Amino acid sequence: MTSSDALPLQRFTIVEVNDRDVPLCLRLASSLAGKITADLGATVLKIEPPGGDPVRRAPPLLPQGESALFQFLNTSKRSLVLDLAGADGRAALARLLETADAVLFEEPASVAVLARGGKATAIEIAAFPVEMDAASRPVSEFTILALGGLLHMVGEPERKPLRLGGHQASYAAGLTAFTGLAAALAARDAGHAAPAVRVSLAEVMQWVNWKAASGAEASGTSPGREGKASEFQIVPCRDGHVAVVYTATQWPQTRALIGDPRLADPKYNTRAGRRQHVAEIYTIMTPWFADKTRAEIQKTAQAKGVPFGPIFSPVELLDTEQYVARGFLATLGKYRVPQLPVQWNGRSFAPRPAPELAT
């Protein structure tokens, strides 16, 4: 490769340890951190237990039987099976860590002491803060979402909370772990000692749900499921639904976009007034959307500086203008796989297929 073609992390080697009996939510987080690192060019060696990473068998399954989750999370990596319960497997891992730049692993893990004590910078993903001394506590992504307050934010107020779709807690923690890993690699590259990194899903969810803390500080009450009392809502249009979102400073543009003189009432001039009369506002605004398509609404709103956004189905997302323009989906054999949403020297990062199980 020429210098302009070189990937930013291609000179680094990372060991990702997927130990047996680790909660799925932690395994997904470390896998995402390793995926980003590998797609950016690093050599990422994925250590799997005998029989392979359990994610290889996790739903949803593709028509040929492969796990879509595994295929997505393990692009561009290499695979090596080691029985870390035995002395030979531990010795092999120790040798790998002597030359690696960093090691990604989860807590609790049988190799935690080994991973923390080698020359490779330790990047550790746990469920809870170290102060909780809760390494052995049962954990799932659902409990993490509940502890972080996210379940208090999603769904209708008269119904039970809804679990967020996908794996937001794990992926947010994985992105956080990658950020720490990138900082550690930069320190090593500059000849400095790189401190170990520890990320907990519970703390990451506290950060993701920052509105709970800031809302409680501002009003004394943590915001929750507001339903039809919410300031921002989903409204129907001619071919689907649109998200009505605007900042406090964008209310004049929003009012002008809708064009109904009733919105000029002084009681709507402040955010507090709009929240107090939110039902009236949506009674006035909703008819404006009914005869327009999502594309028409988005184009007209953007021209006025209002960030109304169309609601897409997963299938529709595949061909949205932004995804196509950024080349967000790459074709890997039989699959279309999301690429990293960043570019390097004006080009996207082309992932390689997830590895077959190797020994």
Image (cartoon, rainbow, N blue to C red):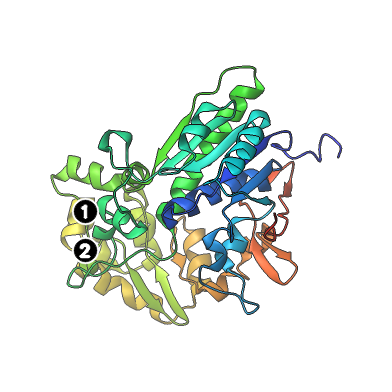
* Between 113 and 302, the one nearer to me in the picture: 113
Residue drawn 71% across the image and 50% down it: 349
CB of mark 2 within 8 Å of CB of mark 1?
yes
Residue at image position (62%, 48%) is 46
Give residue 99's quadrant in the image. top right
Q: Would you call the spot at circle 2 few (<14 residues within 10 Å), some (14-19), or many (20 or more)? A: some
The x and y percentages for residue 31 are: 55, 51
From this view, report whether residue 117 is shown above or below residue 210.
above
Quadrant (top left, top right, bottom left, bottom right) of the C terminus: bottom right
What element does badge 1 sit on?
A: loop
Q: Is residue 325 left or right of residue 310?
A: right
Q: How many marks?
A: 2
Which mark identifies residue 226? 2
Between 242 and 312, the residue placed more toward the observer is 312
State how far apart marks 2 and 1 are (Cα).
8 Å
Residue 119: image x %, image y %? Answer: 59, 25
Local SS, label 2: loop
Q: Report if residue 75 is visible in the image.
A: yes
Amino acid under disc 2: Glu
Q: Is residue 335 above or below residue 48?
A: below
Q: Of all residues shown, which one is farthest toward the left?
A: 220
Farthest right residue? 2
Which of the numbered marks, if any, corresponds to residue 315? none
Left or right of 165? Residue 224 is left
Residue 161 position in % (x across, y down)? 25, 66
Q: Position of residue 193 (x, y in %)?
A: 56, 18
Q: Residue at x 21, y 63 (%)?
A: 226
Q: Tell me the kind of residue under disc 1.
A: Pro
- Of the numbered discs in the image, which one, if any, rests on residue 223? 1
Using the image as rendered, state which of residue 263 and residue 334 is in the foreground: 334
Task: Name the residue rendered at 54%, 68% in the picture.
Answer: 57
